[in-house]
Amino acid sequence: MVKVNVRGKSHASRPWARRLRVDMQAYKLGAHQVEGKTLSWTIKVDGHWDASFRQHAGDKDLWAKSFRKHTGTHTVQVIKNGVRQHTYTVRTR
């Protein structure tokens, strides 16, 4: 048996102009593997904490947010295990 830390990926989409959706998925373990450290995700909006997720192998989570009209430009950061992975910009006209 091999102890393996949980790994995963995220995918973002814009279903509407002022909405951002981020899907986070942890990979499943292979044969003869045992789960080590969990995978942690953090979402920051405009530099402030908005959500946190901890995932075990094979887990899926979803974060979505709609921004009000005429509130300016918002930045959303997706952070995986303490390292920033993606930065998205949402403009609300």
Image: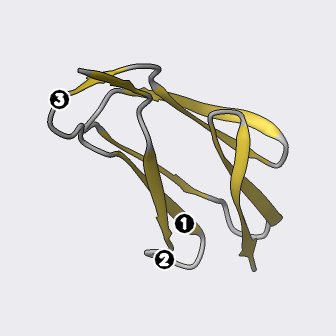
Q: Position of residue 56 (x, y in %)?
A: 33, 27
The 10 Å Cα crowd at callout 3, few under 14, some 14 to 19, many 20 or more, is few
Residue 34 found in image quarter? top left
**In the rendered image, which quarter contains the N terminus?**
top left
Question: Residue placed at 47% from the left, 56% from the top?
Answer: 10
Left or right, 93 with respect to 15, comes to right
Question: Cβ–Cβ below 8 Å for labels 3 and 1?
Answer: no
Residue 19 found in image quarter? bottom right
Query: Pointer 3: what residue?
Result: 32
Residue 79 found in image quarter? top right
In the rendered structure, which amino acid carries the disc numbered 3?
Answer: His
Question: Cβ–Cβ below 8 Å for labels 2 and 3?
Answer: no
Q: Alpha carbon of mark 3 to alpha carbon of mark 1: how far? A: 41 Å
Q: Alpha carbon of mark 2 to alpha carbon of mark 3: how far? A: 43 Å
Q: Position of residue 59 (x, y in %)?
A: 28, 36
Query: Pointer 2: what residue?
Result: 16
In this rendered view, identify the residue nearer to me: 7 or 67: 7
Question: Residue placed at 45% from the left, 54% from the top?
Answer: 9
Q: Alpha carbon of mark 1 to alpha carbon of mark 2: how far? A: 5 Å
Mark 3 lies on a secondary structure that is loop
Question: Cβ–Cβ below 8 Å for labels 1 and 2?
Answer: yes
Residue found at the very far front of the displayed protein: 1
In this rendered view, identify the residue nearer to me: 93 or 23: 23
Left or right, 74 with respect to 38, comes to right
In the rendered structure, which amino acid carries the disc numbered 2?
Answer: Trp
Question: Residue placed at 63% from the left, 34% from the top?
Answer: 81
As displayed, is residue 65 above or below residue 20?
Answer: above
As displayed, is residue 29 above or below residue 21?
Answer: above
Query: Pointer 1: what residue?
Result: 19
Mark 1 lies on a secondary structure that is strand
